[in-house]
Amino acid sequence: MTAPALQALAPGLWPHLVVAPLLLPMLTAAAMLLLGEKRRRIKGWVNIASTFAGLVMAVMLLRWVDRHGVPGVVGVYLPSNWDVPYGIVLAADRLSALMLVLAGIVALGALLFAVARWDRAGVHFHPLFQIQLMGLYGAFLTADLFNLFVFFEVMLAASYGLMLHGSGRQRVSAGLHYVAINLVASSFFLIGAAMIYGVTGTLNFADLAVKIPHIPADDRGLLHAGAAILATAFLAKAAMWPMNAWLEPAYSAASAPVAGLFAIMTKVGVYAVLRLWTLLFSDQAGASAQFGGPWLVVGGLVTIAFGSLGMLGAKRLGRLASFSVLISSGTLLAAIGFGRPALTGGALYYLASSTLSVSAFFLLAELVERSRVAAGDKPEGDTVPGRIDDGESHFDSRLGANLDEEEELLIGRAIPAAMAFLGLSFIACTLLLSGMPPLSGFIGKLAMLTAVLNPLDGPTVSRSAWALVALMVGSGLVSLIALSRAGIRHFWAPQDRPAPRLRVIECLPIGLLVIACCALVVNGDALVRYGRATAESLQHPTPYIDAVMTSRPVPSPSRMPEGIAP
């Protein structure tokens, strides 16, 4: 059913679609906790149905935005029904709708991969997965700093459990490091938000944008200090150098579906920087206009270089995927820092492509490594789930172990075309991550390079712009070399290697994510235009601010004028 049809069918329910992506995972997680651990299959189906329903809602919001997004806001929802800026505010616009759809696609792919066997590696996987989604959706929809912190903590609390899911010494060690870094970042978040509140007296995004241009000169230094501390928390989550040492050990140690889901996590930090920087420090921010932009550019460029060097030195596929995340984050942060709508629009297209391709590569890496174990090679410090009986989990140390419907080991059952599927998927991921034609990674980089080198979109090409061009091209070349080397080692050099034992449900999400990247190519023109329209609305946030500030609570039935039905 299309968005207009739904609105015509139930006009009173349509505004509540903004809050539905939050309520659905929260209620699903609560319901699954009541089911207990012995009903894993039922919980898996419930999890898949809920995640798919959340993706459908996100797509409906995105379609509505694309059709009626002239003011930049689909809807403003006041869950507490208090006046702005005192109550909780949720707002859906082009950017948040895009991020919701991305999160839904990545989550569905990771979940389908997990139900093949990884959800048996520990307890409460499915409730934690839904709580993670609730935190992600809330971070993309909230319109005030305090609730952004709340949803960050919800998201991180669930990620701690998912990060440690599956046990193992390497995973626990990297997980504890991950927890410690994020706790420090959360402290910076609170300190920065408190300083901003002390200067402005508000935490609502729109209200902050209204008040910041009028901050007295004596308080502006404190405002900038608070913003810098707050940005430190976001940039640590976005993995900008030098705050990214946690990412590669954590992501490469996590189980394959968890790492696939975490592909969207660094983009939450990028989203927060883009949302707040364009709102609070736009050209209308007076003396604070474009505050911090040059630092974003420099930090992004160094992050690209760091990720490229990491890819040259990495051999394991999980590490290659982790360093690809760093390159993606650095590219996005540097592009955002220039503050040019055409460049930001191309970066949003690249964000979608890189998130989907990295998620697919994390899932693919586990299947490719399994082929080495099938040939008798030693596994590289990982474990896979075995059976769970009466709430007790048991792990099989063989990385290639596969389970049938009765959770017994499969022996000698291999998909005949397994290696062909893995090889073609690896080639697709290599082209996507290195930005080679004809896939979406190339289109995203081409859109950004065109914007950087186009003198009609801004001033003459600066040194930092040339540095971005050089690093984008260089990182693509490095990625191609590193991934080609890994492909030769895994697919070409081995002789008489038996095919790994795969399940269709393990291959399906990888294929779907690659197909989604191909869909980005087929609809490239429309999606690039969507990204540029999103960037224009971010660079001119007045409609967003007006939509939030003019929202009013729904009057209670007892206070409605006589003769008006509630």
Image (spheres, grey):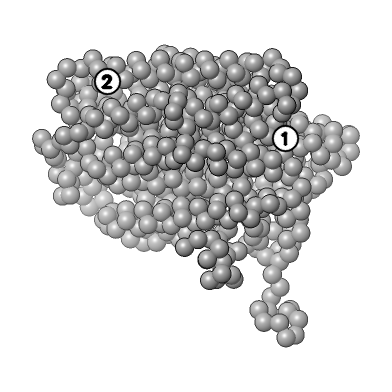
Left or right, 237 with respect to 291, comes to left
> SS for tag 1?
helix
| Residue 464 appearing in the image | yes
Q: Nearer the viewer, residue 329 or 196?
A: 329
* Residue 212 left/right relative to 77: right
Q: Is residue 153 visible?
A: no
Q: Which residue is mark 1?
A: 227
Residue at 56% x, 32% y is 238
Q: Which residue is mark 2?
A: 490
Percent across and percent down for residue 490 are 27, 20
Circles 1 and 2: CB distance less than 8 Å?
no
Q: Position of residue 502 (x, y in %)?
A: 22, 37
Q: Tell me which residue sits at (52%, 56%) in the image.
A: 60
Left or right relative to 432: residue 118: left
Q: Nearer the viewer, residue 434 or 163?
A: 434
Dot 1 amino acid type: Ala
**Circle 2 — which element?**
helix
Mark 2 crowdedness (10 Å alpha carbons): few <14, some 14-19, many ≥20: some
